[in-house]
Amino acid sequence: MDCIFCQIVQGKQKADVVYGNDKLIAFKDISPKANIHLLVVSKKHIISVNELENKDKGIVGEMVLAAKSLAKEFGIDQSGYRLVFNVGRGGGQIVDHLHLHLLGGGFLNNGQPGFTDN
Ligand code: 5GP
Ligand code: ZN
């Protein structure tokens, strides 16, 4: 499958992986928009939140809990952080494989809608 995140999940494409379990993988965004910018990615190829089904709710819960743990590990749990699911082109989604952005530690620019410097 010609999906960059599936290739990372399968180890066919390199990424700076910071966490993984049976359901998800987390790695550093290749083009960070914040000092800490991680992507928490489902191992299952789900296109976006629009394609989520009831049976996938466990994955989403795990993604949010992994982001919480990573925020602590990367020292931004107290300063604060942002969790973002972009959905579709109008929502800023470029990679059509479900992922949760974890951003914090000061924003590098205001390049995404709704983002402000902190
Ligand atoms: P989206 O805009 O789809 O919500 O977010 C996709 C994110 O994936 C972008 O922030 C982009 O920088 C990142 N990204 C795209 N391709 C790669 C890649 O090959 N490796 C990594 N680590 N990040 C990627
Ligand atoms: Zn995929």
Image: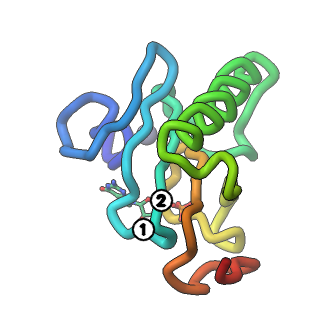
- Ligand 2 quarter of the rendering: top left
Q: Which residue is mark 2?
A: 36
- In the displayed structure, does residue 103 sit left or right of residue 25? right
CA gap between label 2 and label 1 equals 7 Å
- From the image, which quarter does the C terminus lie in? bottom right
In the rendering, at what x and y percent does residue 48 appear?
64, 46
The kind of residue on which mark 2 rests is: Ile
Tag 2 and tag 1, C-beta contact below 8 Å: yes
Mark whose residue sits in front, 2 or 1 = 2
In the rendering, at what x and y percent does residue 39 appear?
49, 48
Q: Residue furthest bottom?
A: 110
In the rendering, at what x and y percent does residue 13 appear?
20, 43
Q: Is mark 1 within 8 Å of ligand 1?
A: yes
Q: How many marks?
A: 2
Disc marking residue 3: none
Looking at the picture, tell me which residue is in the foreground, 99 or 28: 28
At 39% from the left and 58% from the top, the residue drawn is 29
- Which structural element holds mark 2? strand
Q: Which residue is mark 1?
A: 32
The coloring applied to the image is rainbow
Do we see residue 43 in this rendering? yes
- Which structural element holds mark 1? loop
